[in-house]
Amino acid sequence: MSHEGIHGTDGGAGRFGAPVSTHGVDGIDAQTASLPPGIMANPPADPVTRAIPPAAEQDPRPEEHAEPSADTAGEVLRGVPGHTGKRPPTYPPHPLRPPSVRGGDDFAAFSPSVLLDGATVERLTVRAASVRGDSHNWEGTCRQDAMTVTRIGPPEAEMLLLAVADGVGSAKYSHIGSYRATRQAAVHLDREAEGIHAALCARDATELSAIANKAIAGAGAELREGWERTARHENRPYADGDYATTLHVLLVPTDARIRDRVVFSVGDGGLFVLRESHWHHGNPAGDGVIDTRTEALPHAYSTVKSTLLRTAPGEVLLLGTDGITNPLTQKDPEFAQRLARAWGGAAPPLSDFLWQAQTRAKSYDDDRTVVCVWEEA
């Protein structure tokens, strides 16, 4: 959550439709001018289109005798990620220097710039990517987003658990907070899996909210205890706000007969549904949503937003941090349209999904984490 404050300290940053960075992006043009030639290569016009070798390069012999060229066999060159708007963002479109081990934060120094994951369970296909934002690349700071893709519950009550978290930019250890929050939440929700599954079958929003509050509160309390113990061991002060992070968890039953899903949320970001080529907000205000007074874990976790929704095969679910949900809801619809075209059909290969998820939009330079779920019709 780049340059974003905790609730009550920054009322406008990171909201839908608003830039998440306070950098004057155009103000660094002079700095990028000194970069080596070719670093700002022009991206392809459409991030969905693949490069195809010219016909002249194809082997003219009959197909049964053709031998692939060592230079072109299986090669698909996509170039840098595409962009929306008249010109690309000023930041370079690729990772720059990573954090150093000498910085004293091993977790940051060893965090990769990109995470990529996926799964196929029954009729469900998942693609997931977490990418360090342009501003963090430029500053040499680590990715503060995190994600988890796993399964919870026994076979008769099994669910896909998909979680994303966005560490608050101003918090010193928010990258640790986001990483641990997604995993600890999964552990605690697994303990409640049978109850969650039964509540989904019964469409019991009240019970789902109660379970969410119990599980997320338990995860937050356990994390806080561990971090306090670490701080005492290292002889330094402890503050909840140092680990502040948002959290969104989507649970999808693997049994195709159960049509309801549930999202548990704390903070910005959330769920969208791609239906008939248009993105619809999956957890709008009202409609069974429990209001929350907290914007980040672990310092306050007494109430979690819980959203029950019903989907149909063929619809695509998108769970993301505000690095993807903010540009998805910007006034210029080009970004949303590009992703709708890219993800409106069958699930793409992992490498294609990553490239599409990196579609760039000027002024949106935060970390970006997105998990999509396709269901075979």
Image (cartoon, rainbow, N blue to C red):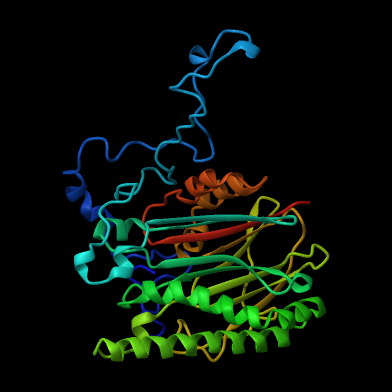
Front residue (pair 158, 268):
158
Front residue (pair 189, 84):
189
Q: Is residue 187 left or right of residue 221?
A: right
Where is residue 39, by image quadrant? top left
Whether residue 332 is situated above or below residue 107 in the rendered picture: above
Task: Pinpoint residue 190: horizontal percent, then vertical percent.
Answer: 64, 78
* Residue drawn at point x = 19 percent, y = 66 percent: 102
Whether residue 244 is situated above or below residue 274 in the rendered picture: below
Task: Pinpoint residue 200: horizontal percent, then vertical percent.
Answer: 76, 77
The answer to whether residue 35 is visible is yes
Where is residue 210, by image quadrant? bottom right
Task: Pinpoint residue 118: horizontal percent, then vertical percent.
Answer: 58, 55
* Residue drawn at point x = 64 percent, y = 54 percent: 278
Q: Quadrant of the N terminus?
A: bottom left
* Residue drawn at point x = 50 percent, y = 24 percent: 73
Whether residue 212 is situated above or below residue 58 in the rendered picture: below
